[in-house]
Image: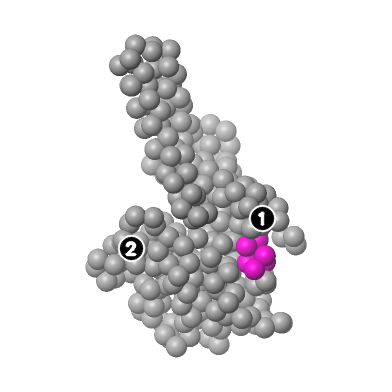
Amino acid sequence: MFFYLSKIFWFFIQPLNLAIFLLLAGLLAALFGRRRLATTGSVLAFLVLGLSAWTSLGAMMLNPLEERFPRPPLPEKVDGIVVLGGGLEGAINLARGGFELNSGGDRMVETAILARRFPQARVVVSGGNGELFLDAEGDADTAPRLLSALGVAPDRLILENKSRNTYENAVFTRRLVEPKPGETWLLVTSAFHMPRAKALFDKAGFPTVPWPVDYRTSGREGIGLYRDNPADALQATTMAIREWIGLFAYWLSGRIDRPFPAPGG
């Protein structure tokens, strides 16, 4: 139920859709002669889109998430690497049989680099189809084609292809791997997603060393207009809002212990 409710809620609240619904509400209000409501809906739609696409709001919201878990020194010994799905274009790969990467593809590239640096480490890819309606191939099903092409032997891979969200990533991977005391496992995911991912793996009883990748901010962004293109700004705002809402929802539901997890607790 949590999975379905979260998907439905996010459909309505993500900035682009929210702006469309506000604009639609304004148009309907205008048709019924409610000028004040029509003006309010239109102004709110403009503010949502303007702040999301033309300002540094998204980057400023993402940066605290990315800085929360700095990348530590690389351990001398690594028993395993866990990479969370989200870096592959599932619908395209299902149709074409390839391994197309999306903007989070650094997760898979970094995993291949780590796997070659630690040739004895097991490599776990955790990620099924997390879409509510879209027919897509889970990252754990696509990853063997990509990682094998990048030089990672297939017999090193452990594939968890049932999870639909980060909570299930942690729980299902813990059951599949059964990590032993004293083992060192790296957790690879996007830097902005690391606070929630690390807290969920800790809660599931799977100790990991956070290895953040896929940074979206330089750390130098200040208040002002976005200096890149509006599409990237809108994407940054969308990801930031989704991650902060996810942290708060997981905390309220008891799946994590703190609304903004930090190293050491």
Q: Nearer the viewer, residue 195 or 247?
A: 247
Residue 124, disc = none
Q: Residue at x 64, y 58 (%)?
A: 255
Q: Seen in the image, is 86 located left or right of residue 200?
A: left
Q: N-terminal of the two: label 2 or label 1?
A: 2
Q: Is residue 201 found inside the magenta-colored segment of the image?
A: yes
Residue 254, disc = 1
In percent of width and height, residue 92 lies at 28, 62
246 versus 171 height, above or below = above
In the structure shown, which secondary structural element does the residue marked by tag 2 occupy?
Answer: loop
In percent of width and height, residue 91 lies at 31, 61
Where are the magenta residues, as a range? 198-204
Question: Which residue is under mark 2?
Answer: 136
Which amino acid type is shown beneath numbered disc 2? Ala
Which amino acid type is shown beneath numbered disc 1? Gly
Q: Would residue 50 be visible to someone looking at this image? A: no
Q: Nearer the viewer, mark 2 or mark 1?
A: 1
Q: Is residue 73 found inside the magenta-colored segment of the image?
A: no
